[in-house]
Image (cartoon, rainbow, N blue to C red):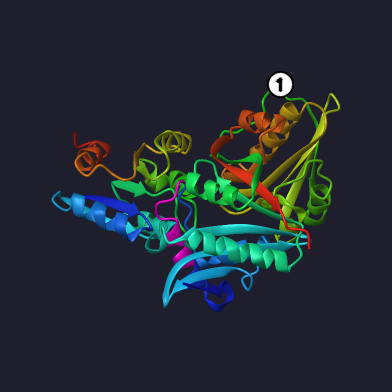
């Protein structure tokens, strides 16, 4: 087996290999070239430091490495069916850790889908510990969505991309890698709504509105009950975007999640966020 | 002859369903991604749509959302065929207005009668 930088392969080859790693996965998540290109761009994946395990000309597995200031992120790690039970996963992990150490990173992050026991075991064996659970949630469109009668809204202020970034840079809780401000810097056409209620409660939502989907939904409550204000803000959002399907990734399992549920969101699956410190150099 | 559109990116799954339904008098159409699936649905107006929720270009859920908003297709039953755990699959199908769901791997003995039921043949 040899390890080759992922940058030596085309996106088509990487997508084909990645999709094969996920054929029998807990949560089916195939990609196409456009999706993988966006993924690498938005999440700062460095293909030169990502790796593909090969046996001759045959791909056995791959793993990718995101790099941000002082930290790295292991992602898309998977082994193709023809490479299983040969230590391929560990070899890829060793390489991604080595790459991280070479960058003098302080912390290495990753997520594993809850219920993917083999992957979780591999990560624990390599020194990763759990930090928290993250929720991937969806909301089906509702053409009849209206703001509930008992919701007393004082004002709704739409904001543009730059203002949305400003809001996102002032979140109180540490976001997961996917939702860090660095990710949003790579996203175009973000929007935001600042919602104020008559009782003085206040919150905002940032999001990306595509033709078919609302994505990158992020809510922050600045004044008031987290669940109630989150629900209020989301009701306002969905009353304005009735036709779009919504997906939001890696929500924290906190009081605000109750607000998401009240606004029609449901849990699709959970990820477990894990981290390990790099050895001191 | 009734027409079934299968929107499925996995070749093995596509072939399996084709083989299982081969003895039955259906016209089978196939799309390997969501965009092609929507186009084919509009062109062919099938009697039943089977959709994988994990598609490479657009999420299956989003495709269902779109199909459900097209007046010409509002009466076409859509069935999610998915590898999600059964409980999640059912919740997903219900929330997105699918007419049912079948979890993978399909039960090859049950599958034809499941399809017949969705087509109103039973």
Name the residue nearer the viewer: B17 or A87.
A87
Horizontal and vertical percent position of residue A101 = 71, 64
For mark 1, what is the residue? A150
Residue at the (84%, 24%) spot, across then down: A199
Label 1 neighbour load within 10 Å: few <14, some 14-19, many 20+: few
Relative to residue A189, is residue B54 drawn left or right? left
Task: Kindly tell me whether residue A249 is visible in this rendering.
Answer: no
Q: Residue furthest left?
A: B23
Name the residue nearer the viewer: B16 or B113.
B16
Q: Kindly state the secondary structure of the residue where label 1 is placed.
A: loop
Quick check: A221 above or below A59?
A: above
Residue at the (55%, 78%) spot, across then down: A8
Horizontal and vertical percent position of residue A42 = 67, 61
- Was residue A16 drawn as part of the magenta stretch in this picture? yes
Q: Residue furthest top?
A: A150
Residue at the (78%, 63%) spot, across then down: A281
Task: Kindly tell me whether residue A76 is visible in this rendering.
Answer: yes
Residue at the (41%, 63%) spot, across then down: A83
Q: Chain of mark 1?
A: A
Relative to residue A247, is residue A109 drawn left or right? right
Horizontal and vertical percent position of residue A238 = 64, 39
Horizontal and vertical percent position of residue B9 = 38, 58
Q: Which residues are magenta?
A: A15-26
Quarter the C terminus of chain B occupies: top left
């Amino acid at each position: 087996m040899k390890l080759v930088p992922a940058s030596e392969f085309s996106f088509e080859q990487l997508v084909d290999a990645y999709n094969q790693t996920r054929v029998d996965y807990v949560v089916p998540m195939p990609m196409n070239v456009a999706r993988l290109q966006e993924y690498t761009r938005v999440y700062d994946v460095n293909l030169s430091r990502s790796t593909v395990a090969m046996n001759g000309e045959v791909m056995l597995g791959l793993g990718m490495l995101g790099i941000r200031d002082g930290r790295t992120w292991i992602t898309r790690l998977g082994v193709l069916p023809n490479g299983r039970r040969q230590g391929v996963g560990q070899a890829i992990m060793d390489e991604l850790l080595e790459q991280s150490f070479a960058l003098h990173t302080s912390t290495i992050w990753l997520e594993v889908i809850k219920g993917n026991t083999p992957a979780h075991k591999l990560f624990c064996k390599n020194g990763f510990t759990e930090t928290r659970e993250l929720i991937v949630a969806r909301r089906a469109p509702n053409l009849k969505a209206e703001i509930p009668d008992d919701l007393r809204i004082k004002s709704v202020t739409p904001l543009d991309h730059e203002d949305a970034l400003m809001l996102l840079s002032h979140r109180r809780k540490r976001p997961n890698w996917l939702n860090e401000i660095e990710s949003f810097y790579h996203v175009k056409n973000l929007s935001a709504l600042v919602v104020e209620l008559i009782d003085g409660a206040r919150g905002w939502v940032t999001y990306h509105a595509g033709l078919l989907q609302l994505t990158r939904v992020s809510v922050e409550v600045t004044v008031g009950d987290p669940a109630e204000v989150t629900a209020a803000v989301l009701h306002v959002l969905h009353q304005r975007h009735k036709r779009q399907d919504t997906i939001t990734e890696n929500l924290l399992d906190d009081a605000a999640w109750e607000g998401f549920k009240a606004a029609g969101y449901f849990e699709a699956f959970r990820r477990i966020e894990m981290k390990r410190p790099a050895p001191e150099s | 002859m009734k027409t079934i559109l299968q929107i499925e990116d996995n070749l093995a799954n596509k072939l399996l369903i084709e083989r299982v339904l081969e003895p039955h008098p259906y016209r089978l159409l196939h799309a390997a991604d969501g965009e092609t699936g929507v186009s084919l649905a509009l062109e062919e107006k099938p009697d039943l749509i089977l959709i994988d929720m994990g598609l490479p270009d657009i999420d299956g859920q989003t495709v269902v959302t779109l199909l459900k908003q097209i007046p010409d297709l509002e009466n076409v039953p859509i069935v999610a065929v998915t590898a999600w755990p059964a409980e999640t699959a059912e919740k997903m199908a219900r929330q997105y207005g699918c007419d049912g769901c079948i979890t993978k791997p399909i039960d090859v003995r049950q599958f034809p009668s499941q399809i017949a039921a969705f087509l109103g043949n039973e």
